[in-house]
Image (cartoon, rainbow, N blue to C red):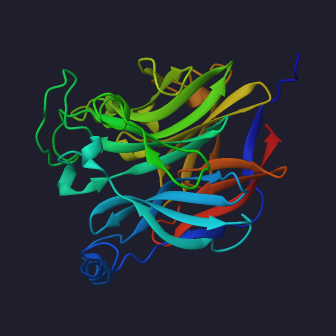
Amino acid sequence: MPTKRKLRPVLDGQWWMIGPNPNLEGKIDGDGEHRVKFEKGLIGEHNAPVDHHIVRDSDGLFHLWGCVRATAIGRVLYHWTTDDVRKSPWTDTGEFIRADTGAGECIDDWGGEEWLQSPYFIRVGGTYYMFYGAHRAGVDAAGRHVGAHEGWRKTADASLHQICLMTSPDGKKWTRHRNADGTSRLFLGPGETRDPCLIEIDGLWHMYYAGYFDYDKPEEGAGFVVRTSSDLLTWSDWRLVHRDPNYGVVRTDTECPYVVYRDGYYYLFRTVNYYRCQTLVFRSEDPYDFGIGDASSKLVARLPCAAPEFYEIDGVEYVSSSHTPLFGEQMCRVRWVED
């Protein structure tokens, strides 16, 4: 029987920049005017990289795709590359992906903006998968069309939100998955659905993600859920695995779930604040229970990062982070120590 050890993650060294804020002038209409508003202090961010993930293609090149928020049109997925993760910064490709309303993405979305976000990659056999949030589907639970909505600061949005899929044969060029109805979505809800993370457990894929249930009762609304699948296309119903308002009641206090397995235990990372560089780490023997209501007994660490993603590359473990949206995505070595 494998040895079980209670561990906690610690940073091992200094951060280095990998995905600096992109210049979208001439690429997105209105970027220049948006930048001027930021420089005058009229808006808080401009082309700010946040949720992200890294994938290694069939030729060994590393690709960083990140959600860049606060652009002139909303949120896009932006692309950097490198042949060595220790380089700083990585190469800015100038490539980005926008929402495709023809695929059912970001329909009549909040503020009239695009809301692509939170890419996550896996490779199975000869196929690469990119799971991502495409926000508003424009339909409710009964499949009825729902018109435009002002956004989360107002009342609950009757439209469900969605996780979508792109695939690639090589990890370089991506094509949207299409359902029979022509959409790229895998599933809807609960509520504002976002921030997918996948891990295979006992031959079954588990997708953890953020779901927001009740905007009128924030203390009951923000949580992490999981769905399972054997083929990555057909997914089970969702199941709540973590919710604790003691660490923050608004939706932005419960973001970017990431789950890893180490020596007999599962670890859930919960981002509670980007700019204050705060991520909570919960430990559990049960991948379906990271604490609901009061998760304090499962809290084992506070890691100074935001939207963390973990990678083992050539025998070294790294973590990437979005704790500096005004500057870009960063990376650091990480190690696990006995608790």
Q: Is residue 153 visible?
A: yes
> Which residue: 61% across, 59% down?
63
**Relative to residue 288, is residue 174 depicted above or below?**
below
Counting from the top left corner in percent of width and height, residue 124 is at 64, 34
Left or right of 205? Residue 137 is left
Counting from the top left corner in percent of width and height, residue 336 is at 79, 44
In which image quadrant can residue 14 be found? Answer: bottom right
In which image quadrant can residue 301 be found? Answer: top right
> Which residue: 21% across, 45% down?
107
Q: Quadrant of the N terminus?
A: top right
Q: Quadrant of the C terminus?
A: top right
> Which residue: 53% across, 50% down?
307
**Relative to residue 241, is residue 89 depicted above or below?**
below
Q: Relative to the observer, which residue lies in front, 92 or 291?
A: 92
Counting from the top left corner in percent of width and height, residue 184 is at 36, 38
Counting from the top left corner in percent of width and height, residue 260 is at 67, 35
Q: Relative to the observer, which residue lies in front, 314 or 185?
A: 185
Left or right of 177? Residue 2 is right
In which image quadrant can residue 338 be found? Answer: top right
**Relative to residue 334, is residue 328 depicted above or below?**
below
Q: Is residue 304 visible?
A: no
Q: Relative to the observer, which residue lies in front, 65 or 197?
A: 65
